[in-house]
Image (cartoon, rainbow, N blue to C red):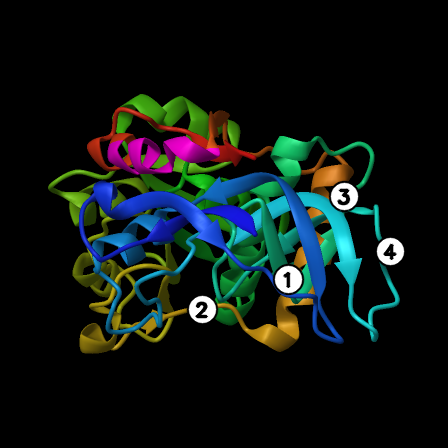
Amino acid sequence: MSKAVLLTDFGPPGVLELGDINIADPGPSQIRLAVRFAGVGPTDLAIRSGHLRDVFPASKGAVLGFEAAGVVDAIGSAVTDVSTGDEVAVLLPGLGGYAELLLANYWVRKPPSVGWDAAAALPASGEAAVRVLNLLRVAPGETLLMLGGTGSVGTIATQLAVARGARVVAAVRPEDFAVAESLGAIPVDYGDNLAGAVRSAVGGVDAVMDAARASDLKTAVELAGGPQRVITLTNPSAERLGATLSGAIPAEIPAALTKAMAQLADGNLVLRRRTVRPLADAADVHSQLEAGTLRSKVLLAV
């Protein structure tokens, strides 16, 4: 048995309750992880609220959480790159992170230079940043509009895009302008006149990456001159607007995790400020994140 935070229904944060689950032995290509830290992301909140129930296959009794870091507890018969006792970070496309034990299909070794909290904060955001920049084909000299530019995904994607030679416009709150500038972006106010703010700062944009918890995707499509190069991570209105709601691409996950972790270990990535809370506080964490009273990357300590 393993302690885990269970989704008892779709709705407000109170639907998250601590309970027990059975964790089986790993399949041939899986590992079982004894979790140290589990990351909380904006998609977790959207799934829990029911906002994504039509596009994300979560159900009652599910365990939220797309990322975690910990120690390998057991390995499947076909696993050769890690052993019991190794320290890894994992990406969980099918959820499962808010737990003491979990089964994972995708992992990357945690280098000694990377702390546990940073390792747990990287997988979902790092994979998403690498994936979307590749899908958007962001090239040197192009202008990328980043919605949620100082969030967990936006922080990483901004740095990777700047390293590619792109110009990044980060739509953020005015109090986050200095942070966006420190990442190499041009900050604009993510307020009622997003279109005017972007056009005043840079004119037009070539592509849009939406990593915000709540986004004005219609304006983003207008700024990009159409939906072809507009990708969102959490906005279900994407299909109606012709934009893309992107999820992890299984075949590309290992390479994305490896790239993101290598950049972090080499000191080329700065992650968003992190707050650590106990696993049992998951519902309260969701409440504070939704209310905007907690504005950092949150890790649940197991």
Q: Residue at x 11, y 41 (%)?
A: 192
Mark closer to the chain start, 2 or 4: 4
Q: Residue at x 26, y 24 (%)?
A: 293
**Which dot marks residue 110?**
3
**Which dot marks residue 83?**
4
Mark 3 neighbour class, 10 Å CA radius: few under 14, some 14 to 19, many 20 or more = many
Mark closer to the chain start, 3 or 4: 4
Q: Residue at x 27, y 26 (%)?
A: 174
Q: Is residue 301 left or right of residue 177?
A: right
Residue 216 placed where, x, y %? 19, 54
Q: Is residue 198 left or right of residue 108?
A: left
Asked if one can make out residue 266 in the rendered structure from this viewpoint, the answer is yes
Q: Amino acid at mark 3?
A: Lys
Label 3: state its secondary structure. Answer: loop
Q: Amino acid at mark 2?
A: Gly
Region in magenta: 279-287
**Which dot marks residue 247?**
2
Please identify, in this view, whether the residue under mark 1 or under mark 3 is nearer the observer: 1
Marks 1 and 3, Cα distance to the nearest angstrom?
15 Å
Marks 2 and 4, Cα distance to the nearest angstrom?
29 Å
Q: Which residue has dot 1 on it?
A: 104
Q: Amino acid at mark 4?
A: Ser
Asked if one can make out residue 141 in the rendered structure from this viewpoint, the answer is no
Q: Residue at x 35, y 57 (%)?
A: 205
Please identify, in this view, whether the residue under mark 2 or under mark 3 is nearer the observer: 3
Please identify, in this view, whether the residue under mark 3 or under mark 4 is nearer the observer: 4
Mark closer to the chain start, 1 or 2: 1
Q: Is residue 273 left or right of residue 62?
A: right
